[in-house]
Amino acid sequence: MNPSRKRRIRLVVALTAALLAASALIYTSFSAGSDEQTAGQLLDGAVAGKTYTLAGTVKDGSVRRGDGVLWFSVRDPHRPVSVRVRYTGLVPDPFREGRGVMVKVQRGQGDVFMGEKDTMVTKCPSKFQVAPPRPGGGPASAT
Amino acid sequence: MIELLVVFLVVLAVVAVVGAPLRGRARGIDPDAELHAELADLEAAKEAKYQEIRDAELDQRTGKLSEEDHRALDAELRVEAIALLKRIDAVRARSG
Amino acid sequence: MATVGRALLIVAFAVALYGVAASLYGAFAGGRAWVDSGRRAVYALAGVLTLAFAIMEIAFLRSDFSFNVVATHSSTTTPTFYKATAAWSSQEGSLLLWVWLLSLWSSLALAVTRRRVREVAPVATAVLMTFASFFLMLTLFFAQPFETLAAVPQEGTGLNPLLRHPAMMFHPPMLYSGYTLFSIPFAFAIGALVTRRLNAEWIVSTRRFALAAWLCLGVGIVLGARWSYTELGWGGYWAWDPVENASLLPWLTGTAFIHSIMIQERRGMLKVWNASLVLATGTLAILGTFLVRSGILDSIHAFGASTLGIPFLILIGAMVLGSVGLVVWRRADLASEHRLDSLLSREAVFLLQNVLLVALAFVVWWGTFFPLISEAVTGTRASVGPPWFDKYIVPLAFAIVALSGIGPLVPWRRLTLASVRRGFLLPALAALVTVLVLLAVPGAWAEPKAALFAGVVAFVLASVAQELWRGMRARQASAREPAPVALAGVVRRNRRRYGGYVVHAGFAILLLGVAISSSFQHARDVSLKPGQSARVDGFDIRYVRATSHAGAEKISLGAVLEVTKGGRHVATLRTTRGFYPSQDISQGIVGRFFGGESESEVGLRAGLGRDIWTVINPNITPLVPIIERGNRTFRRAMVGIMSGPAADRQQAAAQLFALRDAAVTAVARRFVTSPWPADFRFIVSPLATWIWIGAIVTFLGGLLALWPAPAAARRRVSAGYAARVARELARTTQ
């Protein structure tokens, strides 16, 4: 077999192997990925035993803490509904009411969703103030 | 007012720096540019070849190449280096 | 001063556009004078932008809240050190930082190469100035750093507390230096393709800049990981976060390029591959900047959805299309001069390493952009997490580290059985011994992969040590120097080679730290009251006492913990949680001091054997009733003052605020006087510190490889060989 033919065969084999590997990768990503769902989508169609990624804003006044468990509600961006989440594990520092949050959940009893431990991610806000300072009134400094 | 002055001074400085090469010097393409570029390329290739020769020697002295393998490789590299030197001489001759 | 800043940006934009025009005109029609003028435009740009950046920095340091960017990202209570870094915590400031760094590095690159690469440099200048124009256009029309406020507030919002960490001072400038430095080889590649000068001269200049970029970007990435480990309250250093991945992508392809360019240098092969790699790296660097700035993917870094997305996409699209087009157009000039001699040669090892690195980059790229891809394909956004990444990254990283040990032992062009015996024996033995010893350690059976990886690392370290030893002996044989001098001598004369070996060793150590610390980590979440203790991985951690501190900047509630093992004192850990005040008056006069952002101060005891890490989350729910009572009391008092005589109001209000501060301090103090259970996370990670040690060794090696040999020494060496080759030449022509 002449060298250039050998080289061409090597190239074809290598490219085929690369294509197969890439396809395996792409295939597993679609099955391993967890869908991002809004509160409304979860309420409508969440199946018990399947893990979803809940994305939305933390509802004002919904946060309760105790005994290492965090309870909070996540609002749907488009509909006036929210889901209640029971979460254990790491809570990122920027977590607070009114902020964007993403957490992996599974359907629990009723409309309560059980958060998977340590899966919470919060969106860092572009400006971290909650409300603009009132001009004039209020203390002059933070002391 | 002072702000306008500052900006004006900056613009003046920029124009002076950027315009300096354009004042009074000969314009137009350098006729020897092609030659200089080729020479620079060959010089760089020559340096790289010398580095290869040195690397081969170090490879032999640290045991990666046997004596005979090194001799063969060294000869090959020197032939390539000589070819480069010849080409450099030819280019230099062309530029007179 | 803000108007001066705005004006300077306009001047800079004009200079950048002039730079593009003058360089291109000089390259193709006008000659040297215009080319020089174009290059000087780059120097002028650097000067103008330095002034503009200085104006912004001074505004931050003086807390000049008439600048919108200062009012929204800094405050009078922010420590001076962090006032300076606040400049680039903002979208606007960071864009200015990017283009300023680009102008500085471009000036350096063009000054250093002004007598060389004369054909390529003008086109490269035009490309770099195009980037500068793009970023300046963003600062002029999309995110203006010098916007002013009509009503100047008395206090700013303050710096996001998560960013108050020394590493944050250096992380963005290093990262951006890495990105902007990678645009230099990109620009020189475009220039080389356009002018068809893809040979030795281009390689020499490009390689240096690529290595410098690789170094800066690598340091930036490691600083970010260190910040995550010591500042964020999760105890990890890498989360496969989209922004982390974005900075890793150009670093991976840059690493591949640094290796494969050596093959082109020696054998004139892989020209298309190298051109594509360097163009891809530059594009990925811009893509990385885009990911952070556009908010298109959810990440802890995302600065919220912004209007910058579309311009960036256009630029990246242009770069991709332009790169592909250029490579296809010049494919004739990119033909290989030689073919691969043997599959068992250093060239082949480099090629395999390149393929693996590109595969690694593809995995990271796919996982990062998967939410967007899945949305386009299925309509739903889905994301893949660290387990998916680890599944593919771990075996690839394994193979790459193994190759980094094998590569230096394989000669160029052809490997022979004898050289295998000579080179591989000792490292293979070291690997075998390491694996056997580790498997004998109790508990190691649970993680055989970690033991196997330790074996691979032992192979790498042994092969590097072997190379250093043999190099030293070779020099001693000819120079008759004592061992240390000979070692220094051979390293100094072969910086690229030995610098590279040191990098391999450092990187292997780094990954070993990663492997061991993650495989054998023990983590526990517990609730403790003072006096109680928890047991983690053989260590007893006792909550000794609570701490509280109320300062101008924040309120800190924390704990002092004692760590003992077998009764013997190991470490004292201090961890706090800081509560920053919010500007939201609706939270109450007292409440707003507890209602703002919070961040953790990690308690870390690092050691060569293991790290002990802790963070506290003192739940402040028990304080809420007292805070609400305080809110009511102070509000009533405030109302009383406001309805009283106007003359007394000022003084009475001042007295009330003093009382309020005392009250806030007292409320915080309750955590010490009548403490309630606080949540703790304890993590014990063996060999975690070696991650950072390995990183330092890697970068020292990179620095060594980058360091130029003194010109005199180079000429001496060349002259010697020139004489010998010249003698040969004389003989053959006779």
Image (cartoon, coloured by chain):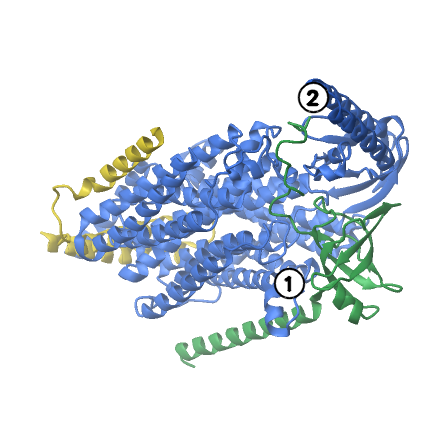
Chain colours: A green, B yellow, C blue
Q: Quadrant of the C terminus of chain C?
A: bottom left
The answer to whether residue C494 shows anywhere in this view is yes
- Give how far across and how far down residue A75 sits, in percent: 75, 58
Label 2 element class: helix
Label 1 element class: helix
In this view of the protein, which residue sits in the foreground, C508 or C472? C508
Q: Residues within 10 Å of mark 1 (few under 14, many from 20)?
A: some
- Residue lying furthest left in this view? B96
Q: Which residue is mark 2?
A: C646
Give the mark toward the camera: 2 or 1.
2
Q: Which residue is mark 1?
A: C392
- Give how far across and how far down residue C367 sits, in percent: 61, 62
**Residue found 75% across the figure and 55% down from its top:** A119
Circles 2, 1 touching at the beta carbon (< 8 Å)? no
Residue C339 vs residue C529: left or right? left
Q: Residues at marks 2 and 1, common chain?
A: yes
**Residue found 39% across the figure and 64% down from its top:** C323
